[in-house]
Image: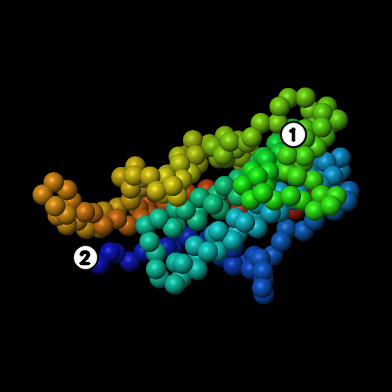
Amino acid sequence: MTPPAFKYAYLEPLFRDVEDLRGEAAYRQLPAPQPTSSLATDDAPLGPYGASILIRNSFTAGVAHADALRRIVLDGEVDPSSPWTLMRGALENFATAAWLLGGKDRTERRRQSLRLWREDMRNRAQHEEDTDHVPGAGGKTGRERVQEIDDLALSLGIHDKLVKPEAGKLIAEAADGIGRDPRQITASWRAASGFAHGRYWPNLRASTVSGAVQGGPDHVLMALVIDESQHRPLTEHTHAFLQHILVRYAARATAR
């Protein structure tokens, strides 16, 4: 049985914004914050561990994920899993940038940046240990960077432990920060994560059966396609984060 054509009209608003962020040979970057801006003031005592670096990297990674899906869709070969996996990546990236742009005050925003940097350096340390990598003369290991971040936090009066940001909690907090229902967004993200990790349950909750054949005396093989009514909310949430970042970053990177 030939699967029905993938109707991707609901993806087009996101795709249009992504196309606007494409350059000749690279994606258009968010600009560095102006020296007198609110964001630059947040970053000033953090040195190389400022939030703006993470925000800009996360944003560009999100654009790349969304653009990869755009190219797959336009090429006409849409499988049941990749749209979930790629949109999940974009959602996580954009939510991270939105989370770093939020925070009720400067101390909280600095804490959030240091939490994410600490996890970044911890992961780097794990990779160094897996590969037996030793930094060159004058360089620091990931473990040394972790300690450097802990010491920096203490010097700024941040005494609580810099715990790893958990993806689900980060996304929920970011959703709340842009005025969206955290449960709706985390529900879509969980389904997408299920596809990304090859779990069974999202096939039952977020796919549509397009055909079935008897695979044996006691089982049936089912052909599955994307349930657009389930993938659409994930897309809309991802697009909302993208639009929020463009507006919020422009304000915080320029205004005092």
Q: What residue do we see at 61% from left, 47% from top?
A: 130
**Is residue 236 visible to us here?**
no
Specify the farthest residue to the right.
36
> Along the line of sight, which residue is nearer the eye, 215 or 78?
215
Q: Earlier in the sequence, mark 1 or mark 2?
A: 2
Circle 1: element type: helix
- Residue 111, numbered label: 1
Question: Dot 1, how many residues are within 10 Å of its Cα: few (below 14), some (14-19), or many (20+)?
Answer: many
Q: What residue do we see at 49% from left, 39% from top?
A: 186
Q: Amino acid at mark 2?
A: Met
Q: Amino acid at mark 1?
A: Arg
Q: What residue do we see at 38% from left, 61% from top?
A: 79
Specify the farthest residue to the front.
132
* Image quadrant containing the N terminus: bottom left
> Along the line of sight, which residue is nearer the eye, 206 or 147?
147
| Residue 214 coordinates in the image, percent (x, y) | 14, 54
